Image: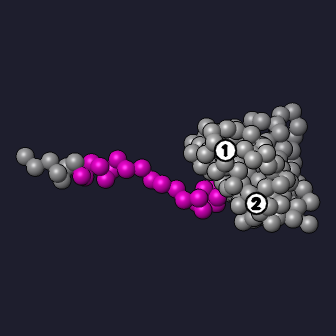
């Protein structure tokens, strides 16, 4: 009996889809904007609906730098392994900010899962709902997640 075809055929159905950073970015922006459009409770504080965010590639660049650092060095912190802060990473990415915020997470395997984690945390939730923020960027690597929010000058 020739098993090459059935084994190959089975393998075709066992492969898992891969998601590009662009598709994850679009899903993240959509999820955040859906939350902002509906309003929510961040801890005991009711947050009203606020305007949607726009994607900013400089914020994405800052988020990507930090998520690569955390994943590559196996840590979770707002401070980088080089002692950088969100403020310095945004400035290094060329983002001229008047307000910013950063959410980080580890362990989630999907946009939905990490959004649920952040929504349950009052501080992270308030970042996503902050009416002062007008733009965002995010990045994902090896179950590490970063969202950077900002308002440019």
The residue sitting at 80% across, 58% down in the picture is: 90
Between residue 90 and residue 119, name the one nearer to us: 90
Q: Nearer the viewer, residue 88 or 28?
A: 88
- Residue 25 colored in magenta in the image: yes
Q: CA distance from mark 1 to mark 2?
A: 17 Å
Density class for disc 1 (Cα within 10 Å; few <14, some 14-19, many ≥20) is many
Residue 71 vertical position relative to residue 62 in the rendered view, above or below:
above
Q: Residue 129, position in %: x, y? A: 83, 49
Residue carrying label 2: 59
The residue identified by callout 1 is 70
Q: Which numbered dot is residue 7? A: none
Q: How would you classify the magenta stretch by its main secondary structure?
A: helix
* x, y percent for residue 115: 68, 44
What is the quadrant of residue 79 in the picture? top right
**Image position, residue 47 (x, y; %):** 86, 44
Q: Is residue 50 visible?
A: no
Q: Quadrant of residue 123?
A: top right
What span is in magenta? 8-27
Q: Secondary structure at mark 1?
A: helix
Confirm whether the magenta stretch covers residue 10: yes
The quarter of the rendered structure image containing the C terminus is bottom right
Position of residue 79 in the picture relative to residue 11 (left or right): right
- Residue at 67 percent across and 55 percent down: it is 64
- What residue is rendered at 79% in x and 49% in y? 84
Q: Is residue 101 visible?
A: yes
């Amino acid at each position: 009996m020739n098993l090459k075809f059935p084994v190959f055929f089975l393998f075709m159905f066992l492969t898992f889809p891969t998601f590009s950073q662009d598709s994850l970015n679009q899903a993240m922006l959509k999820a955040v904007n859906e939350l902002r459009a509906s309003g929510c409770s961040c801890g005991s504080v009711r947050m009203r609906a606020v305007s949607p965010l726009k994607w900013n590639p400089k914020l994405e660049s800052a988020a990507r730098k930090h998520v690569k650092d955390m994943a590559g060095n196996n840590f979770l912190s707002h401070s980088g392994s080089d002692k950088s802060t969100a403020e310095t990473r945004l400035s290094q990415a060329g983002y001229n900010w008047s307000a910013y915020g950063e959410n980080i997470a580890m362990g989630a395997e999907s946009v939905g899962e990490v959004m649920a984690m952040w929504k349950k945390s009052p501080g992270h939730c308030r970042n996503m709902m902050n009416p002062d923020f007008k733009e965002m960027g995010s990045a994902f690597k090896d179950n590490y997640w970063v969202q950077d929010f900002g308002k440019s000058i």
